[in-house]
Amino acid sequence: MTARLKKKLGNLGVDPSSVRANESFCLIGTPLPPLEKTRDNNEFVPLWKQDVRDEKGRRRLHGAFTGGFSAGYFNTVGSKEGWTPSTFVSSRGDRSKKKEARPEDFMDEEDLQELKDSRKIVDTADEMDLTAGTQLGHGDDEEQDSVARALEASMLPSAKDSAGGRILKKMGWRLGQGIGPRVSLRQRKLQDLQAQALSGHRIPGADVEIPDDDEEANKHTYAPRDTPVLAVARKDNTHGLGYRPGMSLTESVGGRGGGASGPNLSTGFGLGALNDADEDDVDVYDAGATQNSRNRTAYDIIDREEEEKISIGTRASAPATRPNSSTETFNDGKPVLLGFVISSKPVSEDGWFPLPDVPKGWKPDPNRVWGKENLQAPEEVSASPEKWSKSGISADQRGNMLGETPLPSAPRSKDRERLKNIAADGMPPPGAAADSSPTPAPATITIPRTDPHIALAALGGGFLPFATNPAKQARYTAYLESQATTDSPPPPPQPLPGQRIDEFNKELEDYAKAAAIFKPLSGAMAGRFTSASIVEHGPQIREGLYTPSAEDLAEKEAELKRVEEEKMTPKEHAARLGMYGPMTRETQPWQPARLLCKRFRVPPPAEPEPEAPTFAQPASEASTEWDQSAAPAASTSGSNAETSTGSTSGGPRDLANIGLGEDDTQGRDTLTYQRPAMDVFKAIFASDDEDSDDEDKEIEETEPEPVKAPSPPPPQPPPPAPDVVMAAPEVVEPVDPATFKPTFIPREGKAKKGLDSDRSKEKKEKKDKKRKEKEKRSMVSFQADEEDGAGLQISPVKDRPKKKRRKEEQVPEDDDSMWVEKPAPDVVKTLSVVPPTEPEPESTSRGRKRAIDFM
Amino acid sequence: MAPSRGPEALPRRLHTTLTGHKGPINAARYAKGAAKYILTGGQDRTVKLWNANLGTEVKTFAAHGYEVLSITVSHDNAQFASSGGDRSVFVWDVATAVTTRRLPGHLGKIHVVEFNQDASVLASGSFDSTVRLWDLRAQTRQAIQVLEEARDAVQTLHVGSSYITTGSLDGHVRTYDLRKGELRSDYIGFPVTSVVPTQDNQTMLVTTLDSHIRLMDMSTGKLLNDFTAHVNTEYRCRACFGHGEASVICGDEKGVVWAWDLLDAKPLEPNPPPKVHNKVITWTEHHPVEKGEMFTASADGTVKIWRQTEE
């Protein structure tokens, strides 16, 4: 970035070092094509070459039929060639490439869709035609000549093959090959006969007459005949099965009727089922009639039928022939179901025993039995664990023997013990109850026993089963205590006065039960649980619908407020109380953009960078401003020093040296001179309307220099901005900075007169303030004085503010002449760069001074 | 006339009513200078220029695509700027009724725009809680600076000679002092909807949504006076100073125009004042120079110009 741009950006508040500002938009090289193929094929094609094609690659008018408006070549109807006919090009060469035109090629989407739909219908019909291939030629082309039919059958593929046919063809089968191994001539003839008998039609191929003894024919094997599809005639009458009208009695009973066995009828004319075959109908030309005797055929068929009959009739033999069926039969001759075996063991009968004799006078007493069982049970149960252990093998051992992996967490011995205890203890209460309850007349006090540890647990468990009745609870506690200690038990509770013994017993039982019930948890799992904290600590529950009273609400609100207030920052608090002022005010530094300051005609506030406020301050300055400027004075003087050191690098800059040739750096500033900031001009010449970026830039460039202003602000209060503006025009307008030559016009005369005294004062002060240049300046001013009285003027009120610190010093009044300096570089450079001296003549460079002096 | 040296009585005689807007009027401003004209911007997306004396509509400026929320007139009356829901500031040429600039950049509706004194900078405060300062001299479309200190929508701002004051819904009035390079934020505690400084730039009138109008000392941030009685809890009801800054005027949400003595903060007679608008009064402005004229703009779609009763 160029420095200029940087500064410009700085003005706009853009950080020139930020990434975004440094982003490069230059791309070098050819961009790679996008990774995914874009759909736009015309992306890189010039506009006039672009054409639109549909998804089939056919060129189409650009949306002409779908709402677009651009058609043809470049929105005209023509082509690039215009209307000239294209020359003939023979397509002979690429005939092979040419695809045969199909109707689909000329169809649009709609048509295609339609076609698709219609095709679907055809397809479904196709699939349904399962018998298509085999049905062929059975009925309607009966009249066709047999040779023609044979030809047709072999040569023309069936229009629609059934699915099976298609599969077969794929496997290598050809039409006319038949299905199954090839057969000899004789067998084939037999097949023909059979088929004929079954279907009543003559097999087309069978007509070809081959004599039995034809050697040639016998040498070959033949494809088996197709099995004719059994076409069942639709039964649309109410006759019984197998009955045909006109059947004779014998036929109907079982003898063979003439229909099937009758003479071969000529096939030329259809014979309905209702027609009887007459003599006339006999096919005179039937070849088979002479060759294959009907009897023989009949015999074969009969033979087969008989076989079947036999197999059906003899049941016993049938199962034997079945592949997997068992040979066994039940006693009653029924065959055993497939897959079942008859058990060798007879079914055992239930034993029936005679009822014992009931002794005389016996009365049922369930209590006895009940009691006995109850008595025994506990012993058994309690004994059982030992029994098991006695029985030799524990579950673990058994598991080990079986190779089981032991359970991950076998119960710990302690737990097991505890469980054992529980198991042991669980029983006694019923036992005790049994002890006490059955005694019909409990005249004595029976104290049910509770194990000490149970009693202790119940005592310590904190559970109060009789909390509602404190007296009862106390008695319960007493009972538990009596049971808890075995050595010297405190006396068990005594029946209340007026309480019957049995009632008291009952009560004690209740206690025992309660202890047993509420103990186990605390006993077995006490280690695992902690009892809940005391219930009374919970909130008080009020009955009924809760309706907060006014007090409650007020209280709640107050609390909320308190909370809110606690949360409030002091600032908010103060605001709430109306204590606006320092409490609610926050001050923080804020840096306005330079441009903004410029637009507002306000000097940018002192920034971190010291040089900031050096140029013209047209606006009226508050006293604080001056203070501020006073503060930077130190720094400015510092910078001044630095510049001076720059110039004096050759040696100490001495008054004696000034203007003399010894100063080797003398010409340098001339070379490095830079025009003062445009802003300065502007401030003076006050045509505030035009602003340009150049100005900004220049200001920025020159800024560093202006800092040099070595002198503290003049004591006089700065004139208000308007003055400046006003003053400037009068002087300035004629001046052209480019051509203007500095001439020192005692223009300040007027001002000077008035200000003379001031001036001298100022001068003095300045001298005090300036350390280094004191002498120099005094001299200079001196000279100036001599040269023209006006020249001395330090600070005409109006001028000073424009120039600001730096200028103030150098050229209080003369500025106009000074500013112009272009032609007299020496002077100028000193003006701007060198610490200025008060009166202009002096302030201008020494060399300059000289010249003046001479003049 | 008010007795003795008290503030002038409020102009209460209805001079004329400007009807023409089809919806609520959100902002209205007197022209600069002699202020013979009034510019109003409303929910109906137009800005209209009225002759205040005759009550006639002079021009309609239609370009906004959303409601107009704020208007500011330049010092020379040659142009004005308006803003609203379309997130751009429109700078208009009054004579030709076209927009000379559209300044996009805000992310939300712009509640307020304000020229600086010589219309070289335009400040706009937006719902996106920023204030953007636009340079009208240069051709750049970038904002000179963006003030992002506000934590909530900026509802109002005022551009002075060397400072910019903003009021936002976060309850702060922030004064950006260009000269000192510092930001003074005064916490008011309630959403600030309008800030109107006095001529001397020493005090400002801060309207907040707690139905208070506060007169704040700008240099110290102290509360000088507090004006209440009106109702203002939801809408931006701009308050203003009466003639000579002797009184404070504000139309409230009930359609009532209140006036207070600046010094003792007592409502002026009649108290309570009569209801003059059917809906909330969104903007009240006193004529900048003439003593007996002011107007009120209301959500009922009318602007009423009030004059002193003739005697």
Image (tube, coloured by chain):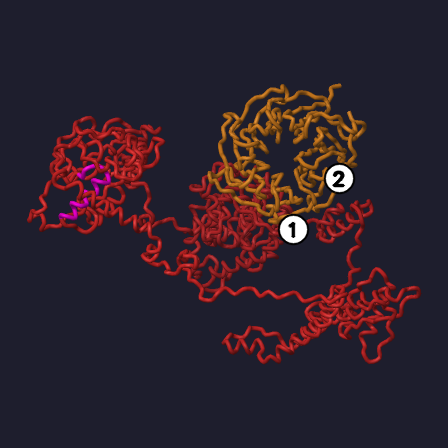
Chain colours: A red, B orange
The count of marks equals: 2
Rendered view: A341 above or below B32: below
Q: Which residues are magenta?
A: A185-203
Q: Is residue A658 visible?
A: yes
Residue closer to the observer: A441 or A179? A441
Judge whether residue A160 is colored magenta: no
Q: Pinpoint residue A767: horizontal percent, then vertical percent.
A: 60, 56
Residue closer to the observer: A505 or A287? A287
Residue at image mark 2 = B226
Q: Pinpoint residue A606: horizontal percent, then vertical percent.
A: 58, 52
Residue at image mark 1 = A587
Q: Does the CB distance between marks 2 and 1 fall below 8 Å?
A: no
Disc number lying in front (2 or 1): 2
Q: Pinpoint residue A161: horizontal percent, then vertical percent.
A: 24, 40
Q: Is residue A95 visible?
A: no
Rendered view: A87 above or below B133: above
